[in-house]
Amino acid sequence: MTLLATEAPANGRGRGAIEFALLMPAILRAGALLLFAAIFIVFAIQSPLFLAPGNLLSIVSQSSILAVLAFGLTVVVIVGGDNALAGGIDLSLAATMGLAAAVYATIVQLGQPEMVALGAALAAGLGIGALNAFSVVVLGMLPLLATLAGMTIATGLEQLISKNATILVDSALTRFLGGTDAQGFPVLAYALLVIAGLLGLGTRYTPLGLNMQAVGGNPLAARASGLGVSRYVAGSYLVSGLFGALGGLLSVSFLGASSKGAGEMLLPIIAATFLGVVFSRRFVPTIAGTLAASLFIGMLTNGFQLLNVSSYWVSGIQGVLTLLVVAATTTRPRA
Amino acid sequence: MTFRGVSLSSSKAMAAARFGRVSRFGLVIAVVVAFVFFALLAPGFIQPANLRSILVNNFALLAIAAVATTIAVHSGGIDLSVATAIDFASLAFVAAIVAGADVPVAFLAALAAAAGAGLFNAFLIAGLGITPFLATLGTLFIGHSVQQLATNGGNPIYISFTSVPPALPALARGGVLGVPIPVLVVLALGLAVHVLLKRSRFGRRSAAIGVQPQLALYSGLPVRSTVAVIYVLTATIAGVAGIFLSANVNAYMPFSGNAFLMNAIGAAYIGTTVSRTRTPNVPGTLAGVLFLAIVANGLLLIGWDFYWQQLGSGGAIFLCLALSYGIQRLRS
């Protein structure tokens, strides 16, 4: 299908079109940033509460869950390539988050030590990740199909464990993660910054990170230069599963409970990852871009609440924005 | 990833071909094994009333959605918004009936609503060049918002008991010569789509696009218009499932199409195993749906509770996919 897109610039008649095509990325990036800034300003003018430090911090901590989950998908897309059908995709992330949250909450409620609950939650995430990795790498399933199956199984397990009910949690870990430091700065925001910093630097400046990008950019070339492509792909799904579990822990801490309906996070996760490409010069998914897009989506949701815009609009607007960005960035000239 | 057109090295080709012939019957064997398993273990499974219930309640609607999905998958794409098409059709159908329209008018309104979702996909995929996955995902979520706005957050719309047109229960539960209408519709749609994909020029174009889109374009095939038709057709046929869904419960339940999504896609891919070239095909899809329907009904009858059934069905799809892809791996 990408061919329809790659043909577009070539069909654009004459030099003017080509020059325009070369300028497109810069125009797009600037346009997207302007749009984001404009929305921010509109919210700030329309709602006096929006710019209150408390509100801004709450946006950050609320976005931390989305961002951590979207980091998982970003890693999968970096390693698997951004062709969504044949490339890397992980549809099971939101369900994994729900499963990990339910596992953690249930075990804490049974009176087991927190470390057991934490270990079990992370193991649940890694388990789903391992299942996805097995399906994709060993069985050769399309990632879309493999992770769709992983999603069904994770959702099934979550409902089995939680009986589709909300489980309240009050543990030292969730109190700490859901709390604030002495200055009133939410711990979730710190957690987000630390995770984003480590992962961002890791994918961008370490040999491992560069190899990941090489595998995603051109698997055949990567294999020819001696990289174990399957190992990187399998690893990316494990990382994604782990981040799904981390997201689950953050969400339990933020809400003080495991919540049903985790599947609704799926679109924001995909939206954050694919919206984030607009922040990178080559229009590829990056950790920094995903972070920015997650904060933007968090801001959008929060601003709508403050402006009393019905939350029913949110998923539609996320869908439209994602489609806009994807449409704009797929008509890019390929180098 | 190697999906279709796996090249076999000539030395292994013979053995692989023999193995491949056996593996093509894997799905049929799975259906038979599941049937015998539940016939032995589940009380009442083999009763005619239950077999009819499998076909009407477990098989028919999913089969329509899966046949629709097969069209998109056949062209190398995917349609995640079959769920949206089902819901839109259901909404339009019920809204029209509630507004006092006759059943045929409501039927057309429903198909038009579903086709609208398909047109939007066609615009995104053929017009803007967005990958089918992201395009239909976007449609799925825009559809979610539209339904939330239309129903004030997801309240069902009921057709009041007194105003149910007599044609509605007949549509859902009637039959011709003892064959339930939904099953007849599956057979008719299945046959039509099968002929379209395997015997028409359109089908050959769609297959060419599915295997090698670049080549199809350079060979002068009308790629864009073919792709556009594929997505409109997929959504419109999926809409038929939405109509039967409404007729079954005399209501529109928001977001109920999502329940079909995973199984429809799963069945379409499982169905590729019965084809020698592993092309998506209608008979295979229907066999896949039959397998899922038998498992869902059987698990219910042997007394698994709702949550275990969900997990069991998910596990069954996964196992089926794992086996079929595993066998393909061994062959190549």
Image (cartoon, helix red, strand yellow):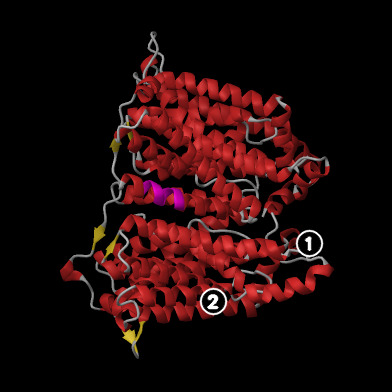
- What is the span of residues highlighted in magenta in the rendered image? A153-159
In this view, B302 is above or below A329: below
Q: Quadrant of residue A33?
A: top right
Q: Secondary structure at mark 2?
A: helix
Give the Cα distance between marks 2 and 1.
39 Å
| Residue placed furthest toward the bottom | B177
* Secondary structure found at label 1: helix
The image position of residue A286, as x and y in percent, is: 63, 32
Q: Which residue is mark 1?
A: B218
Q: Which residue is rendered at x = 45% and y = 53% of the image?
A: A152
Q: Amino acid at mark 1?
A: Tyr
| Marked residue nearer the N-terminal end (2 or 1) | 2
The reply to whether the magenta stretch includes residue A154 is yes
Q: Residue furthest left?
A: B162
Where is the N terminus of chain B found, in terms of image quarters?
A: bottom right
Q: Residue at x 60, y 27 (%)?
A: A199
> Which residue is label 2 attached to?
B28
Report whether mark 2 lies on the same chain as mark 1: yes
Amino acid on which the number 2 mark rests in the picture: Val
Specify the subunit that label 2 lies on: B
What is the x, y in percent for residue A296?
49, 29
Looking at the image, how many numbered discs can be counted on the residues? 2
The answer to whether residue B4 is seen in the rendering is no
Q: Nearer the viewer, mark 2 or mark 1?
A: 2
Q: Nearer the viewer, residue A321 or B212?
A: B212
Q: Nearer the viewer, residue B65 or A50?
A: B65
Left/right of residue B214 with respect to residue B323 in the rendered view: right
Is the residue under label 1 in contact with that under label 2 (CB below 8 Å)? no
Q: Residues within 10 Å of mark 2 (few under 14, many from 20)?
A: some
Crowd band around label 1 with a 10 angstrom C-alpha radius: few (<14), some (14–19), many (20+): few
Secondary structure that dominates the magenta span: helix
